[in-house]
Image: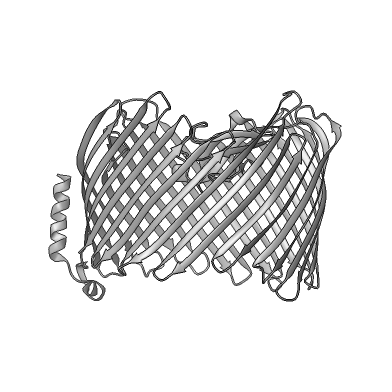
């Protein structure tokens, strides 16, 4: 009955439709604009083949065909300034055929349908109201297995208060969804509420405030416990500027309370003051107060920093900084204080030459009185990079405590598995994550990493650091030589260092880089020596970009060799040394054919040998897009090969899509 009413309403709308000009100029009880229609045809093939050495092979394939019709029409009631919006309807048909080795094959067919109506009421008034309401029945396709239906209803409203001094926007939305066709179907209901407000007083002050609340409930249909996830966030930021923009004070307050998925709470209050005291003198003071609860840990932290910087003839900058901090953690605490001196010299020489030198020296004293020998690090940001050194920030990490989640809230519930989605490698006291060929983690994904690390529970020690470096460039910066050297020493002043031994470390790095009209290149050598870790690295790269009429060609080569001489804790009594080589080669060719076809050919090869993971990755793809009058055509084809010795995998994808607009 519901579908029948919708189709009758569509027919009435089509009969009564008027042009957009009439919609803007006329006034009537019900005004309609021009109908926008399109039809989309899509075919997609996915194939996967895996070989496990001498055991057995496994293969699967999936063919999908979709046909979608889209209809949209603008409307207004009495006048476009009273109430205007749009009505959209999508109707789709799908078919699929899948098969897998050792499993039953299958076929599927069905219908997708959704509608959405939105609008804005009194758009020129001080309090305009926006709304949307829709319902959808979508077919969710899963690779090489049976699919299921997702039914969802969504409704929401936004209210904006157009005030000269404090404009405010409030939003509320509800999404109810449920699955149909799975072995165990689920329901999920989500409510979101937010308020944003802004206040600006000339060039003196700007204040931004934000409130956000979400309530997410999910459960199994027909039984099972339901899960509820609550998240509430408040934030306020004020920026004061005076004295001709020479003085600035930034105040920030944040509060977050989450329960259900990750039970945690934090409160952050910070003040940042900076001022120009003269033509060559700057100063600043920073303060931060953080209160954090989560996963059995409670931490209350205070931090204060101050700095003074002087510039001499715009060439020599001298910066003096002091800092202090204290953290109360469960039944213990940790405090520290210190200072540093930094000198930076910049000189522009004749004939496009430039010289840069820098020197830094600092001391910091740490007093640790913890109740246990482990510290918890929550949500450390990390960008996943294939064939790169993805080191965690803290040393002495407990490898089994590592957990990953995606920084994107929409993907935050995905569970990543060690040994499948990523590998963990201990390099002396450092820990790195390897993502090569991960089925769920893509190159460049933003991740949040939580883990525990070993610390000395009762010790007082001083940290001395000194570093220097410089660079010399010619030809207006097109060619550069650079080097840097750093030394760090720990000295125990009181207590014990029987959990983590205090010691020293140093490293130096030298290299060069350059660029021409079509090429960029460079190389560097790094040598790192510490009590529990010694390694050196040689890395070089070459990039070539050549544009030409109606196209371009890009080539790249990057190679890095790492030699590790691990010296683990004395209690382990072992030393492991190995060399690891990482090679990446790729090409991208782009060409415009016949004036309307955008073609891209891409190939990438990556090789890792000598390390904990031996792997070859090879990928080729073809991407073509073209527009013929009212028709868009898209073709994509890609094949990936992955070889790990006794394990190999090949997967391919072909997608053809045609869209016709009316």
Residue 372 in the image: x percent, y percent?
Answer: 71, 27
Outermost residue toward the right in this view = 493
| Image quadrant containing the N terminus | top left
Image-based side of 114 in relation to 254, left or right: left
Q: Quadrant of the rendered structure where residue 302 is?
A: top right
Residue 568 seen in the current view: yes
Residue 222 in the image: x percent, y percent?
Answer: 30, 26
Q: Nearer the viewer, residue 437 or 119?
A: 437
Q: Please say if 518 is above or below 488.
A: below
Q: Quadrant of the rendered structure where residue 296 is?
A: top right
Q: Please say if 350 is above or below 96.
A: below
What residue appears at the point 30 percent right and 54 percent down from the top-left corner? Answer: 635
Residue 225 in the image: x percent, y percent?
Answer: 39, 26
Q: How many marks?
A: 0
Residue 294 seen in the current view: no
| Image quadrant containing the C terminus | bottom left
Q: Nearer the viewer, residue 342 or 201?
A: 342
Q: Quadrant of the rendered structure where residue 463 is?
A: top right
Image-based side of 576 in relation to 409, left or right: right
Image-based side of 230 in relation to 99, left or right: right
Residue 97 in the image: x percent, y percent?
Answer: 23, 37
């Amino acid at each position: 009955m519901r579908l029948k009413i919708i189709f009758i309403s569509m027919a009435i709308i089509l009969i009564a439709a008027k042009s957009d000009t009439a919609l803007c100029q006329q006034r009537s009880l019900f005004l309609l604009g021009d109908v926008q229609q399109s039809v989309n045809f899509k075919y997609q093939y996915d194939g996967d083949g895996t070989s496990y050495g001498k055991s057995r092979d496994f293969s699967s394939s999936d063919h999908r065909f979709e046909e979608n019709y889209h209809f949209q029409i603008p409307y207004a009631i009495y006048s476009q300034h009273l109430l205007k919006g749009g009505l959209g309807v999508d109707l789709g048909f799908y078919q699929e055929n899948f098969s897998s080795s050792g499993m039953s094959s299958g076929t599927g067919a069905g219908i997708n349908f959704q509608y959405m109506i939105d609008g804005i009421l009194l758009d020129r008034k001080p309090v305009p109201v926006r709304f949307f309401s829709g319902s959808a029945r979508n077919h969710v396709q899963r690779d090489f297995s049976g699919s299921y239906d997702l039914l969802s209803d969504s409704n929401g409203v936004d209210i904006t208060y157009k005030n000269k001094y404090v404009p405010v926007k409030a939003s509320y939305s509800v999404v109810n969804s449920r699955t149909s066709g799975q072995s165990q179907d689920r329901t999920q209901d989500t409510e979101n509420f937010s308020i944003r407000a802004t206040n600006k007083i000339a060039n003196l002050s700007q204040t931004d405030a934000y409130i956000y609340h979400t309530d997410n409930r999910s459960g199994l249909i027909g039984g099972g416990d339901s899960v509820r996830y609550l998240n509430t966030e408040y934030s306020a930021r004020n920026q004061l500027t005076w004295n001709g923009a020479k003085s600035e004070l930034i105040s920030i307050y944040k509060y977050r309370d989450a329960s259900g998925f990750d039970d945690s709470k934090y409160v952050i209050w910070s003040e940042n003051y900076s001022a120009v005291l003269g033509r060559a003198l700057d100063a600043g003071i920073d303060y931060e107060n953080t209160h954090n609860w989560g996963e059995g840990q409670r931490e209350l932290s205070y931090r204060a920093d101050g700095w003074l910087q002087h510039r001499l003839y715009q060439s020599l900058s001298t910066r003096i900084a002091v800092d202090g901090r204290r953290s109360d953690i469960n039944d213990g605490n940790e405090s520290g204080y210190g200072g540093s001196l930094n000198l930076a010299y910049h000189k522009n020489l004749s004939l496009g030459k430039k010289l840069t030198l820098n020197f830094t020296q600092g001391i910091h004293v740490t007093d640790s009185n913890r109740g246990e020998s482990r510290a918890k690090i929550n949500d450390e940001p990390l960008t996943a990079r294939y064939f790169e050194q993805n080191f965690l920030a803290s040393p002495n990490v407990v490898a089994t405590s590592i957990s990953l989640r995606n920084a994107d809230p929409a993907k935050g519930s995905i569970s990543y598995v060690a040994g499948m989605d990523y590998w963990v490698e201990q390099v002396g006291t450092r820990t790195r994550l390897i993502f090569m060929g991960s089925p769920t983690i893509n190159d460049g994904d933003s991740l949040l990493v939580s883990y525990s690390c070993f610390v000395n529970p009762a010790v007082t020690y001083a940290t001395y650091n000194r570093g220097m470096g410089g660079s010399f460039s010619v030809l207006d910066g097109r060619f550069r030589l650079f080097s840097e050297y750093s030394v760090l020493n720990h000295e125990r002043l009181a207590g014990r260092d029987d959990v983590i031994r205090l010691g020293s470390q140093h490293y130096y790095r030298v290299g060069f880089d350059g660029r021409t009209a079509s090429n960029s290149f460079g190389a560097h050598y790094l040598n790192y020596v510490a009590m529990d870790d010694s390694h050196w690295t040689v890395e070089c790269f070459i990039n070539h970009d050549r544009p030409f009429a109606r196209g371009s060609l890009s080539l790249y080569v990057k190679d890095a060799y790492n030699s590790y001489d691990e010296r683990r804790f004395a209690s382990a009594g072992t030393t492991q040394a190995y060399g690891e080589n990482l090679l990446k080669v790729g090409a991208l060719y782009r060409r415009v054919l016949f004036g309307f076809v955008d073609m891209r050919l891409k190939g990438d090869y990556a090789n890792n040998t000598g390390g904990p993971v031996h792997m070859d990755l090879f990928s080729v793809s073809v991407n073509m897009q073209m527009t013929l009058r009212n028709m868009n055509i898209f073709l994509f084809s890609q094949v990936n090969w992955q070889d790990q010795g006794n394990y190999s995998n090949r997967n391919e994808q072909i997608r053809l899509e045609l869209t016709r607009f009316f």
